[in-house]
Image: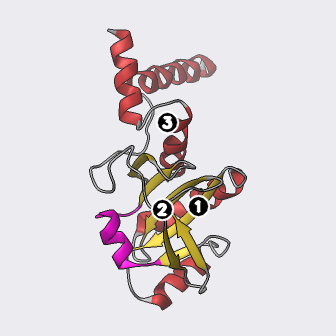
Protein backbone atom coordinates (compact mmCIF):
# COMPACT_ATOMS: atom_id res chain seq x y z
CA UNK A 1 0.00 0.00 0.00
CA UNK A 2 2.76 2.45 1.01
CA UNK A 3 4.69 1.76 -2.21
CA UNK A 4 1.57 2.47 -4.26
CA UNK A 5 1.08 5.83 -2.55
CA UNK A 6 4.73 6.78 -3.15
CA UNK A 7 4.46 5.83 -6.83
CA UNK A 8 1.23 7.81 -7.19
CA UNK A 9 2.79 10.91 -5.59
CA UNK A 10 5.89 10.54 -7.76
CA UNK A 11 3.76 10.40 -10.88
CA UNK A 12 1.81 13.50 -9.83
CA UNK A 13 5.05 15.43 -9.23
CA UNK A 14 6.25 14.37 -12.68
CA UNK A 15 3.01 15.62 -14.24
CA UNK A 16 3.34 18.97 -12.47
CA UNK A 17 6.97 19.30 -13.60
CA UNK A 18 5.97 18.65 -17.22
CA UNK A 19 3.25 21.29 -17.07
CA UNK A 20 5.48 23.92 -15.47
CA UNK A 21 8.49 23.29 -17.69
CA UNK A 22 12.11 23.89 -16.78
CA UNK A 23 13.01 26.33 -14.03
CA UNK A 24 15.78 28.26 -15.68
CA UNK A 25 17.43 31.63 -15.48
CA UNK A 26 14.87 34.37 -15.80
CA UNK A 27 15.91 36.67 -18.59
CA UNK A 28 15.48 40.23 -17.42
CA UNK A 29 16.04 43.39 -19.44
CA UNK A 30 19.33 44.53 -17.88
CA UNK A 31 22.58 44.00 -19.66
CA UNK A 32 23.60 44.23 -23.27
CA UNK A 33 21.06 43.26 -25.92
CA UNK A 34 20.97 39.62 -26.98
CA UNK A 35 22.93 38.95 -30.17
CA UNK A 36 25.00 42.11 -29.64
CA UNK A 37 28.78 41.94 -29.74
CA UNK A 38 30.61 42.76 -26.52
CA UNK A 39 33.87 44.43 -27.49
CA UNK A 40 36.97 43.29 -25.65
CA UNK A 41 37.68 45.06 -22.40
CA UNK A 42 40.83 44.35 -20.41
CA UNK A 43 40.64 44.85 -16.65
CA UNK A 44 42.59 43.73 -13.59
CA UNK A 45 41.22 41.15 -11.20
CA UNK A 46 41.71 41.33 -7.42
CA UNK A 47 45.02 39.45 -7.78
CA UNK A 48 46.39 42.09 -10.16
CA UNK A 49 46.13 39.78 -13.20
CA UNK A 50 44.87 41.17 -16.49
CA UNK A 51 41.54 39.67 -17.58
CA UNK A 52 40.09 40.09 -21.07
CA UNK A 53 36.31 40.20 -21.22
CA UNK A 54 34.40 40.00 -24.50
CA UNK A 55 35.88 40.03 -27.97
CA UNK A 56 37.07 36.94 -29.81
CA UNK A 57 38.04 34.12 -27.42
CA UNK A 58 39.01 30.45 -27.64
CA UNK A 59 36.09 29.46 -25.39
CA UNK A 60 32.66 30.77 -24.50
CA UNK A 61 32.61 33.18 -21.56
CA UNK A 62 30.21 33.08 -18.63
CA UNK A 63 30.30 36.44 -16.85
CA UNK A 64 28.66 36.20 -13.43
CA UNK A 65 27.92 39.40 -11.51
CA UNK A 66 27.97 38.89 -7.74
CA UNK A 67 28.22 40.89 -4.52
CA UNK A 68 29.75 39.85 -1.18
CA UNK A 69 26.63 40.92 0.75
CA UNK A 70 24.23 38.96 -1.47
CA UNK A 71 22.92 35.75 0.15
CA UNK A 72 21.83 34.35 -3.23
CA UNK A 73 25.38 34.91 -4.52
CA UNK A 74 26.77 32.97 -1.56
CA UNK A 75 24.36 30.09 -2.23
CA UNK A 76 25.32 30.14 -5.92
CA UNK A 77 29.05 29.70 -5.19
CA UNK A 78 28.97 25.88 -5.21
CA UNK A 79 27.16 25.94 -8.58
CA UNK A 80 29.75 28.33 -9.98
CA UNK A 81 32.54 25.99 -8.87
CA UNK A 82 30.75 22.99 -10.39
CA UNK A 83 30.18 24.70 -13.77
CA UNK A 84 33.75 26.02 -13.94
CA UNK A 85 35.18 22.54 -13.26
CA UNK A 86 32.80 20.60 -15.49
CA UNK A 87 33.03 22.93 -18.50
CA UNK A 88 36.61 24.17 -18.07
CA UNK A 89 37.65 23.08 -21.59
CA UNK A 90 34.82 24.93 -23.35
CA UNK A 91 33.90 27.74 -20.94
CA UNK A 92 35.74 30.56 -19.21
CA UNK A 93 34.00 31.70 -16.02
CA UNK A 94 34.69 35.24 -14.76
CA UNK A 95 33.21 36.72 -11.61
CA UNK A 96 32.44 40.44 -11.68
CA UNK A 97 31.48 42.21 -8.50
CA UNK A 98 29.39 45.29 -8.17
CA UNK A 99 30.75 46.45 -4.80
CA UNK A 100 33.87 48.43 -4.00
CA UNK A 101 35.28 47.08 -0.70
CA UNK A 102 38.28 44.96 -1.75
CA UNK A 103 38.56 43.19 1.64
CA UNK A 104 34.94 42.04 1.45
CA UNK A 105 35.53 40.65 -2.04
CA UNK A 106 38.67 38.81 -1.00
CA UNK A 107 36.84 37.31 1.98
CA UNK A 108 33.83 36.31 -0.16
CA UNK A 109 36.14 34.64 -2.68
CA UNK A 110 38.12 32.83 0.03
CA UNK A 111 35.06 31.73 2.02
CA UNK A 112 33.39 30.24 -1.05
CA UNK A 113 36.52 28.61 -2.55
CA UNK A 114 36.44 30.69 -5.73
CA UNK A 115 40.16 31.55 -5.83
CA UNK A 116 40.71 29.62 -9.07
CA UNK A 117 38.43 32.02 -10.98
CA UNK A 118 39.18 35.56 -12.12
CA UNK A 119 37.34 37.97 -9.80
CA UNK A 120 37.00 41.53 -11.07
CA UNK A 121 35.84 44.43 -8.92
CA UNK A 122 34.66 47.17 -11.25
CA UNK A 123 31.61 49.36 -10.64
CA UNK A 124 32.42 51.01 -14.01
CA UNK A 125 32.13 47.70 -15.84
CA UNK A 126 28.80 47.01 -14.13
CA UNK A 127 27.54 50.39 -15.30
CA UNK A 128 28.92 49.87 -18.82
CA UNK A 129 27.17 46.47 -19.03
CA UNK A 130 23.97 47.93 -17.49
CA UNK A 131 23.74 45.28 -14.76
CA UNK A 132 21.26 46.33 -12.09
CA UNK A 133 20.81 43.16 -10.03
CA UNK A 134 22.84 40.20 -8.74
CA UNK A 135 23.40 37.36 -9.20
CA UNK A 136 23.18 37.94 -12.94
CA UNK A 137 25.01 36.14 -15.75
CA UNK A 138 25.88 36.84 -19.37
CA UNK A 139 26.92 34.05 -21.74
CA UNK A 140 29.13 35.13 -24.65
CA UNK A 141 30.08 32.87 -27.54
CA UNK A 142 33.62 32.62 -28.91
CA UNK A 143 33.00 35.67 -31.11
CA UNK A 144 32.03 37.82 -28.11
CA UNK A 145 28.34 37.82 -29.02
CA UNK A 146 25.85 37.76 -26.14
CA UNK A 147 23.83 34.57 -26.58
CA UNK A 148 22.00 34.24 -23.29
CA UNK A 149 21.56 36.16 -20.04
CA UNK A 150 19.52 36.10 -16.89
CA UNK A 151 19.13 36.17 -13.15
CA UNK A 152 20.87 33.09 -11.75
CA UNK A 153 19.98 31.99 -8.22
CA UNK A 154 21.00 28.33 -8.49
CA UNK A 155 23.06 25.78 -10.38
CA UNK A 156 20.01 24.89 -12.48
CA UNK A 157 19.73 28.54 -13.55
CA UNK A 158 23.40 28.59 -14.60
CA UNK A 159 22.95 25.32 -16.48
CA UNK A 160 19.84 26.69 -18.19
CA UNK A 161 21.90 29.48 -19.76
CA UNK A 162 24.32 26.91 -21.15
CA UNK A 163 21.58 24.48 -22.20
CA UNK A 164 19.49 27.05 -24.02
CA UNK A 165 22.41 28.15 -26.18
CA UNK A 166 23.37 24.51 -26.82
CA UNK A 167 19.83 23.89 -28.12
CA UNK A 168 19.60 27.11 -30.13
CA UNK A 169 17.42 29.20 -27.81
CA UNK A 170 18.31 32.50 -26.16
CA UNK A 171 16.45 31.91 -22.92
CA UNK A 172 14.39 29.38 -21.04
CA UNK A 173 11.37 31.57 -21.72
CA UNK A 174 11.95 31.26 -25.49
CA UNK A 175 12.31 27.47 -25.18
CA UNK A 176 9.10 27.21 -23.11
CA UNK A 177 7.27 29.45 -25.58
CA UNK A 178 8.30 27.20 -28.50
CA UNK A 179 7.19 24.10 -26.60
CA UNK A 180 3.83 25.67 -25.78
CA UNK A 181 3.32 26.67 -29.43
CA UNK A 182 4.11 23.11 -30.52
CA UNK A 183 1.45 21.72 -28.15
CA UNK A 184 -1.23 24.08 -29.47
Tell me the SS state at disc 3. Answer: helix
Residue located beneath label 1 in the image = 93
The N terminus: image quadrant = top right
Q: Quadrant of residue 35?
A: top left
Residue 20 visible (yes or no): no
Residue located beneath label 2 in the image = 64
Magenta segment boundaries in residue numbering: 121-135
Q: Quadrant of residue 88?
A: bottom right
Q: What residue is shown at x 29% (from left), y 63% (from top)?
A: 130
120 is higher (above) or lower (below) than 174: below
51 is higher (above) or lower (below) than 170: below
182 inside magenta stretch: no
| Left or right for 46, reference 148 | right
- Front residue of 67 and 10: 67
Whole-percent x, y for residue 2 in the image: 60, 22
Residue 164, which numbered label? 3
- Front residue of 59 and 66: 59
Whole-percent x, y for residue 10 in the image: 54, 24
State the CA–CA distance, disc 3 to disc 2: 17 Å
Badge 2: few (under 14), some or many (20 or more) residues near its Cα, within 10 Å? many
Whole-percent x, y for residue 94 in the image: 55, 65
The disc, 3 or 1, on the residue closer to the chain's N-terminal end is: 1
Amino acid sequence: MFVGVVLFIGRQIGNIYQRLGPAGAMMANPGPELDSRVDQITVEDIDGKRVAIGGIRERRSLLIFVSPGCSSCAELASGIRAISRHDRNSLEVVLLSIGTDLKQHQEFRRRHSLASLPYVVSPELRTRMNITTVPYALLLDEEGVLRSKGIVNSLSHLESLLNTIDHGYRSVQELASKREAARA
